[in-house]
Amino acid sequence: MKRVIVIAMLGVMSVLVLPTKAQRAKVATSAPVYGYTVVNSFPHDPQAFTQGLIVRDGVLYESTGLNGQSSLRKVRLETGEVLQRISVDGRYFAEGMTDWNDRLIQLTYTSKIGFVYDLSTFALQRTFDYTGQGWGLTHDRRRLIREGAATRTRRPRFPEAAEPQRSRRTAR
């Protein structure tokens, strides 16, 4: 008897909750639908697990992450040819990266260490530390903006550049 009542209640509740055909049609027509067109595709190293990338002066700069195999690369976009590459110390899993004036700044996933490289030579200029995880890094020409697992603003000790600002939290 209890099963019959529960089943009957579920049936009544589903009728009350489910939208009508007219309501479904209204929702379907009110939400904009966007498409896309592929205008070009480029070759890419299938062993390079991209964690951060920028295009600057027609060249792709890429931070790749993989335990023991992370790197920083400069790649000819049209051909996928790696023009310049350095390996990141095997202790670090490289993540987000951005350019900042004549430098590249790269974060690590959980090591709480960031790297600052010379843009043209990839020479390591220095490291800096920060709290939380390092995921994404970008800038708005005035300040660095870092995304990580923390919900509060995280500011790396990076005195010669604008302090990173918090971005909106996004799903990963």
Image (cartoon, rainbow, N blue to C red):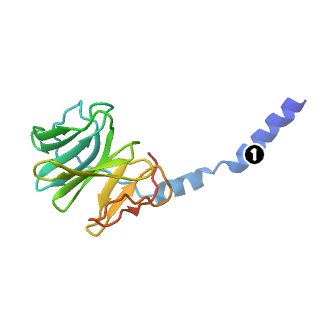
Residue drawn 53% across the image and 57% down it: 26
Of residue 85 and residue 156, the one placed in the foreground of this image is 156
Q: Quadrant of residue 66?
A: top left
In the image, taking residue 33 as reference, residue 39 lies left or right, namely left
Q: Position of residue 109 (x, y in %)?
A: 38, 43
Around disc 1, counting alpha carbons within 10 Å, would you say few (fewer than 14), some (14 to 19), or many (20 or more)? Answer: few
In the image, taking residue 30 as reference, residue 12 lies left or right, namely right
Q: Quadrant of the C terminus?
A: top left
Residue 39 visible in image: no
Relative to 106, is 46 above or below? above
In the image, taking residue 32 as reference, residue 48 lies left or right, namely left
Residue 166 visible in image: yes
Q: Position of residue 21 (x, y in %)?
A: 59, 50
Task: Name the secondary structure under disc 1.
Answer: helix
Residue drawn 81% across the image and 41% down it: 9
| Residue furthest to the right | 1
Q: Quadrant of the N terminus?
A: top right
Residue drawn 75% across the image and 45% down it: 13
Mark 1, residue position: 13
Relative to 27, is 66 above or below? above
Residue drawn 89% across the image and 32% down it: 2
Q: Position of residue 78 (x, y in %)?
A: 10, 43
In the image, taking residue 15 as reference, residue 160 lies left or right, namely left
Q: How many marks?
A: 1
Circle 1: residue type? Met
Of residue 108 and residue 27, the one placed in the foreground of this image is 108
Q: Position of residue 134 (x, y in %)?
A: 38, 48
